[in-house]
Image: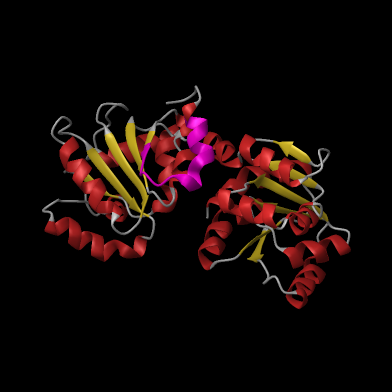
Amino acid sequence: MGEILAAAPLARELRKLWPGAALTVSTGTETGQALARKHFLPLGALVCYFPLDIPWAVRRYLERLRPHLIITLESEIWPNFLDLSQQRGVLLALANARMSDKSFRIFLRYRRYSLDLINKYDLLSASGGQDYQRLKELGAPAEKLHLSGNLKYDRLLQERDEAKARNFRRMLQGGQDLSAGQEPVFLAASTHPGEEEVVLAAYERLRGPYPALLLVLAPRHPERAASLAERLTNRRLAFHYWSRLLAGLEAAAIPWCWWTPSATSSAFIARRIWPLWAAASCRTAAKIFWNPRPGGYLPFMAPTWKTSAGPWKSWKRPGPG
């Protein structure tokens, strides 16, 4: 889902460059389809599923769409798709390119095969310095390789909306139009089973020195709502559902809000609604790291952060936070 949202500023720029071009956005999941339709249909784009990476499926896909340029994001490298697209003379680009520790080790082990895949691209745009160096070490040609920065930053900076921020704050503060920064917020985003217990324990301790502290809990999988509600009730913690606040079915009256749709958690951080603590799930910390940085916020994260080494190192350098 993050890749789909990150593609939005790229799609808008492509539309400006080639206003008459047909734009197609493909995803691999039903959730991705729903998100892509929401963000790309207004741009006049066709939204469809990405084919299985088997030759006959890819051939039918390419014959139907007849693309001139294909841009894949982050680590979406599909051998058959790349090979058949290149055979048809389609220009290929990898944008926001990422190379995790695990992927890098695999690519190094099979360097000859990996380099063949990489060379099929006409353009490689790395999202960060570490990704750039890893692609360079694998043998990516200098004339193809570029360090362009992270598309997720572009999206977060472009989507700030102060009017919406004031509306969100008003709902969470029980209808009062309080100035930003008056009450602190603890955001626990993209949490997994077992991690909420750690968050709740920390929240209960923090409420001693910060009695007005608001907790916003955004589980990674919203379908876990019923089990989490039971857990909160057992702890005797009153809470609101964000969906009910949003629908006007209730007003915020307690220092606890349970915010279900985790996919939009970054909007609160990026729009600078409140000063907050951001607690990242140990399994998805890399995603949480990218979201607060443009807004100047400092996240806390769980001990397991090997998959987030790149973002973590960037936080240790001077900058926001």
Q: Measuring 54% from the left and 56% from the top, which residue is drawn there?
A: 38
Tell me where residue 183 appears, x and y as whole percent.
24, 30
Report whether 49 appears left or right of 211: right
Q: How many marks are shown on the rendered structure?
A: 0
Tell me where residue 95 appears, x and y as whole percent.
69, 46
Report whether 303 appears left or right of 196: right
- Residue nearest the observer in this picture, 233 or 35: 233
- Quadrant position of the C terminus in the picture: top left
Q: Measuring 42% from the left and 34% from the top, which residue is drawn there?
A: 163
Which residue is most to the left?
236
In this orientation, does residue 321 appear? Answer: yes
- Residue nearest the observer in this picture, 288 or 216: 288
Q: Measuring 61% from the left and 54% from the top, which residue is drawn there?
A: 103
In the image, residue 239 above or below residue 215: below
Q: Measuring 44% from the left and 50% from the top, which residue is drawn there?
A: 284
In this orientation, does residue 44 appear? Answer: no
Report whether 14 appears left or right of 318: right
Tell me where residue 69 appears, x and y as whole percent.
80, 54
Which residue is most to the front?
109
Magenta stretch containing residue 119, yes or no? no
Q: Main secondary structure of the magenta part?
A: helix
In the image, residue 30 above or below residue 203: below
In the image, residue 50 above or below residue 216: below
Which residue is most to the top?
318
Colour pattern of the rendering: secondary structure
**Residues in magenta?**
300-315
In the image, residue 47 above or below residue 198: below
Tell me where residue 158 appears, x and y as whole percent.
56, 36
- Residue nearest the observer in this picture, 146 or 250: 146
Report whether 265 appears left or right of 103: left
